[in-house]
């Protein structure tokens, strides 16, 4: 039997392929019993390019942790044209003349979109509306009234202005729709707009410059190189606190044991709370969450995921 592969693979997705297309290619190349499950953390629309994090084997258990990271995008916005999908694939709904805005006015408008802001997801999105994916209803011509939700734009920088086109770099929280951001930006300027292009540059600690091109995945001869590019489970969440455990505790946790604070504190008075990785000899054993009370001995530990 082939050796099982668990971890994540950073892929630079091409334009005009779906995220699922990349998943299928990876599953085919890493087949033969070497990987049981393949998924991805954070969908990229077909017109978009850039970093797509592929989850291999037990790496699929990391989906929520990886998807929660901050995203960095390079986005092209075209003023004066609104489409029903808010991107270049949609039907043109409205066109307007674009005034010769001075750069300072555009910069000032950008600043209004930094911080915690409310945003309505696009009707053509995977958000569920009355139990159905919104895009399925929108494609049938049905009204989709999605609720506003709060997202965070950490920074928004204008890189170039060549009206009617504007290029921006945006750092934002998980759950942000850059299509909605582009549309709202156009409405604020009074011209309307749609997202002309999108490239994901980073997700959490991972950057597209470290990714393999999706074209390479279709070539069987590239398998040895791609296998070396797989990031093991223990390194897949580099920003999370790491706790080394002994063999006895590792085996107990893998068999369902719920650790207590004394198992992890190792006699120290270092008070902390949040998520942590339990590691043994470089292998990820489990992810736990520590919720502290007023005193150390009031700490409550909950296992979030266990890895075999």
Image: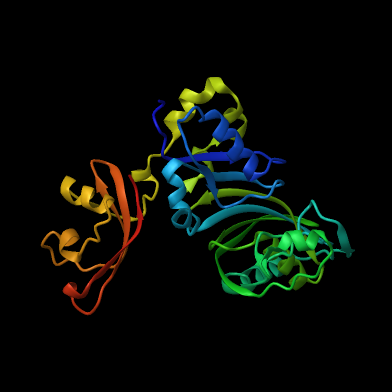
Q: Position of residue 145 (x, y in %)?
A: 73, 73
Q: Position of residue 208 (x, y in %)?
A: 53, 43
Q: Nearer the viewer, residue 163 or 15?
A: 15
Q: Is residue 74 left or right of residue 105?
A: left
| Residue found at x 66% / y 53% | 75
> x, y percentage for residue 41?
53, 50
- Give the farthest residue toward the top: 221
Residue beneath the point at 16% across and 48% down: 248
Image-quadrant location for residue 256: bottom left
Q: Nearer the viewer, residue 288 or 296?
A: 288
Residue 205 at least partly seen = no
Question: Compared with residue 65, is residue 35 higher up or lower down, i.e. above or below?
Answer: above
> Residue drawn at (63%, 49%), measured in percent from left and top?
44
**Could you tell me how many numbered marks the image carries?**
0
* Coloring applied to the structure: rainbow
Viewport quadrant of the C terminus: top left
Q: Is residue 112 left or right of residue 105?
A: left
Above or below — where is 90 with respect to 273? Answer: above
Residue furthest to the left in view is: 267
Q: Which quadrant: the N terminus? A: top left
User: Seen in the image, is 161 located left or right of residue 268?
Assistant: right
Observer-nearest of 286 and 168: 286
Q: Which quadrant of the structure image shows residue 72?
A: bottom right
Determine if residue 198 is in view. Answer: yes
Above or below for 102 versus 209: below
What residue is at 86 percent from the left and 56 percent from the top? 91
What x and y, as percent, mark residue 219?
Answer: 59, 23
């Amino acid at each position: 039997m082939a050796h099982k592969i668990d971890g994540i693979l950073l892929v630079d997705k091409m334009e005009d392929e779906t995220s699922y297309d990349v998943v299928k290619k990876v599953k085919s190349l890493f087949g033969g019993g070497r990987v049981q499950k393949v998924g991805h953390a954070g969908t990229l629309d077909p017109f978009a390019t850039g970093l797509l994090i592929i989850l291999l084997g037990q790496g699929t258990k990391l989906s929520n942790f990886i998807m929660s990271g901050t995203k960095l995008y390079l986005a092209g916005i075209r003023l004066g044209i609104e489409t029903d999908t808010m991107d270049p694939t949609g039907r043109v709904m409205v066109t307007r003349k674009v005034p010769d805005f001075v750069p300072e006015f555009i910069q000032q408008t950008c600043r209004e979109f930094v911080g915690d802001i409310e945003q309505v997801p696009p009707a053509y999105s995977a958000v569920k509306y009355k139990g159905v994916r919104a895009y399925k209803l929108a494609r049938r011509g049905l009204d989709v009234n999605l609720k506003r939700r709060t997202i965070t734009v950490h920074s928004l920088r204008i890189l170039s202005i060549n009206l009617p086109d504007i290029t921006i770099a945006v750092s934002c929280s998980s759950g942000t729709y850059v299509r909605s951001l582009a549309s709202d930006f156009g409405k604020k300027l009074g011209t309307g707009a749609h997202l002309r292009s999108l490239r994901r540059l980073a997700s959490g600690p991972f950057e597209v410059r470290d990714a393999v091109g999706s074209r390479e995945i279709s070539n069987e001869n590239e398998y040895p190189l791609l296998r070396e590019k797989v990031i093991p489970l223990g390194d897949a969440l580099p920003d999370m606190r790491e706790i080394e455990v002994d063999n006895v505790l590792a085996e107990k946790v893998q068999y369902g044991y719920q650790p207590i604070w004394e198992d992890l504190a190792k006699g120290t008075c270092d008070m902390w709370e949040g998520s942590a990785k339990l590691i043994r000899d470089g292998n990820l054993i489990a992810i736990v969450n520590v919720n502290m009370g007023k005193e150390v001995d009031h700490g409550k530990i909950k296992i979030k995921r266990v890895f075999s």
